[in-house]
Structures are given as C-alpha cells and as structure tokens.
Amino acid sequence: MPQSDFFENVYEVVKLVPLGRVTTYGAIAAYLGSRRGARMVGWAMNNCHARPDVPAHRVVNRNGILTGKLFFGSPTAMQELLESEGVHVCSDEIIRFSEKFWDPSLELL
DNA sequence: TCACTGACTTGGC
DNA sequence: CGCCAAGCCAGTG
C-alpha cells in the first residue's frame, strides 16, 4: 500500500471518469461512503501530484467550479485540459455541467 | 493523544 | 447572487 487506501480509492474513481466527463468531490466522497468526506477527496487530489495518471482536472466542486485550477501550476492549465477534452469552461465554471457530470455511484453502479 | 489543516457541502441571512 | 458559520473525515506534526 502506497500511502492510504482512501487516497488510492479516490484516484481509482477519478481514473474511471470517462474522457469529456467530470465529477465532483462530493460524488466521489459519496461513492466512498462519506458525503461530507469531500474534503478528504480534495486532500487526496492534493497528493495527486504523486499520481500523474490521475486526471484531477476532471474533478470539480459540486457547483462545477474549477476550484483546484490554481493547484495545476498554471491558472489556465485545468481549463485548457477540460477544453481539450470537449468540456467547455467559462469563468472557471463548467458549461452544461449537468450533462458533463459523471456520478460514480450512479454511472458506475 | 490532541490540535490544526484542507482542491468540500449545506443551510441560513 | 453573495458571504458566513457549522459539520464532516483523514492525514500530519
């Protein structure tokens, strides 16, 4: 076990997110069992720098806002990545987020 | 063991 | 539509 199974679980779910789709911290946390554990998901993403295979840019808050874009090194890196995958972003907010939203506890059911 | 922190969420004003 | 306070869990010092 690398660091923590919890983190690995988060990474696993994030990696399962289809290209062109996005998910939320709460959704992942809910899938793990703790809806309020969304902070842990964010914390796990903070460690995502140790997991290059984890598309953290596909993880946003429940409002569809690119909350962690500032953590990508470049303030536009996250947006560029999403745009590159077909996800339109405007003012740090994902357009038609409802359609792009991918719920692991729902789609991965 | 205790206390602090954090890329969140929700409810209230 | 905006900001504030509380709740939650796990990791680190």
Image: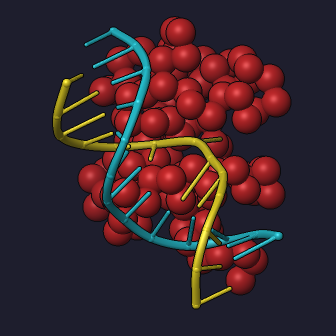
Chain colours: A red, B yellow, C cyan
Q: Is residue A63 above or below residue A83?
A: below
Image quadrant of residue A64? Answer: top left
Looking at the rendered image, the quarter that the N terminus of chain A falls into is: bottom right
Left/right placement of residue A100 relative to residue A82 reads: left
Q: Is residue A5 above or below residue A68?
A: below
Looking at the rendered image, the quarter that the C terminus of chain A falls into is: bottom left
Q: Position of residue A100 (x, y in %)?
A: 39, 29
How many marks are shown on the rendered structure? 0
Left/right placement of residue A108 relative to residue A93 reads: left
Q: Nearer the viewer, residue A56 or A17?
A: A56
Q: Position of residue A62 (x, y in %)?
A: 38, 36
Q: Nearer the viewer, residue C1 or C4?
A: C4
Q: Nearer the viewer, residue A44 or A14?
A: A44
Q: Residue at x 50, y 35 (%)?
A: A60
Q: Position of residue A103 (x, y in %)?
A: 34, 47
Q: Position of residue B3 (x, y in %)?
A: 61, 68
Q: Is residue A103 visible?
A: yes
Left/right placement of residue A106 relative to residue A13 reads: left
Left/right placement of residue A69 relative to residue A73 reads: left
Q: Is residue A84 visible?
A: no
Q: Residue at x 64, y 43 (%)?
A: A55
Q: Nearer the viewer, residue A82 or A33?
A: A33
Q: Residue at x 27, y 53 (%)?
A: A106
Q: Residue at x 73, y 35 (%)?
A: A71
